[in-house]
Amino acid sequence: MPSDVFRRAPFTAMLAVVSALASLAAASSALAQKSYDPGASDTAIRIGNLMPYSGPASAYAIVGRIEQAYFRMINDQGGVNGRKLEFISYDDAYSPAKAVEQTRRLVEGDEVLLMFSAMGTPSNAAIQKYLNGRGVPQLFAASGATRFGDPNGFPWTMGWQPPYQVEGRVYAKYILANKPEPRIAVLYQNDDLGRDLLKGLKDGLGDRASQIVAEESYEVAEPSADNHIARLKASGADVFVSITTPKFAAQSIRRAAEMAWRPLYLQALVSASIGAVLRPAGLDNAQGLVSAAYNKDAADPQWIGDPGMKRFHAFLDAYAPDVNRSDNSVVYAYGAAQCLVEVLRRAGDTLTRANVMREAANLDGYAPDTLLPGITIRTAPNDFHPIEQLRMMRFEGDHWRLFGPVIDGDLRN
């Protein structure tokens, strides 16, 4: 055998070893670039959700259905960074006790990576401490309660819609600009929704808060708002602020009309839906109502040529063709789901709970398809209120008409 073969053999073996080590290092590096917490893998991301598919707030159940459909569309398009989204949504019947039970099931049984868009102030308040104690993101809670934007006290919780206190301040400014000597009556839900928005209203009124001549609170288990409306009318108020969820909002609009009570009527935006509230109340009864908005109205013809709303309608055509597009909960769900997908996209292969929260807290300037022009998502490590801008709107004919400029809230640090 030629002597040069012996000289080449050790060198060839050394190259093989080096090549093998290099391949191992590359594989290790690739693995090191991926980081997962429970609920995430190379192929899937599990997302937990609570929705009142039954109970007094079941009108909001459409939110869960639309979010499910949106994630199905994303999966059909290849998922997020190649991973399919598994959306696990349970009924909590708008019951805090049920919400806690179902959340434990999602976190400890289904091992979701995060909770997303749980519906309502009572349910989110009930699960907030548990999720923060376990370090599980409570992302884009479907509530405007101020408590869901406290990064120091609850670093794993972030709301979505404008805080109720901001909304209350906006209504106060509008009342004072249009009623020099208002006599104000308020109906509010007896929870963080009602108390938060009422606080914002009073803060905005300042020393004119004494012109609230009547306040009535109600419990979600009550069958009717009729008696409350009768007492508020009897107060002699010429301004009515309705801080109500859909069932009670529709009842209040209808009852006020039946009693021929025609105050300046402000309806909290959580129940400004044409499909879920105004149509059941009767569109004739809703004429002249005033509210606020941050989303485009899918039934408004001014958005026919809008690129974002074209995508929205194309999604509905393909994945939820039978829904009522005049229900603003449909628009809400699409925007929130789109924002979560953006957070997960930015998180890349680092699908840890901490990184998901880090990305959610750095969305400055992001705009889902459904936000009104001039309104954007703005979050930061010290600012967990994604949306703090509104425009006023008035119900005329069969749709809401926007008026006035974009109004910034003042809760930012």
Image: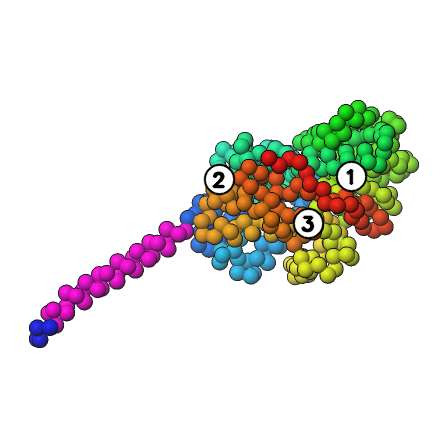
Instruction: Give the amino acid at mark 3.
Output: Gly
* Residue 29 counted in the magenta span: yes
Q: Residue 398: where, in percent of width, then height?
A: 83, 51
Which label sits in the foreground, 3 or 2? 3
Question: In terms of depth relative to the viewer, which is nearer, 222 or 170?
Answer: 170
Question: Which span is picked out in magenta?
Answer: 5-34
Name which residue type carries label 1. Answer: Gln
Nearer the N terminus, badge 1 or badge 3?
1
Q: Which residue in the structure is indicated by mark 1? A: 267
- Sequence-wise, the earlier of marks 3 and 2 is 2
Residue 97 found in image quarter? top right
Q: Which mark is residue 374?
A: 3
Find the residue positioned furthest to the bottom: 2
Q: Nearer the viewer, residue 324 or 210?
A: 210
Report the mark closest to the observer, 1 or 2: 1
Seen at 67% across and 52% down, the residue is 370
**First in sequence: mark 1 or mark 2?**
2
Q: Quick one: label 3, few (<14), some, or many (20+) residues within 10 Å?
A: some
Q: Which residue is mark 2?
A: 108
How many other residues sit within 10 Å of disc 1, few (<14), some (14-19) or many (≥20)? Answer: many
Image coordinates of residue 348 in percent, x first then y, are 47, 52
Left or right placement of residue 275 versus residue 131 in this view: right
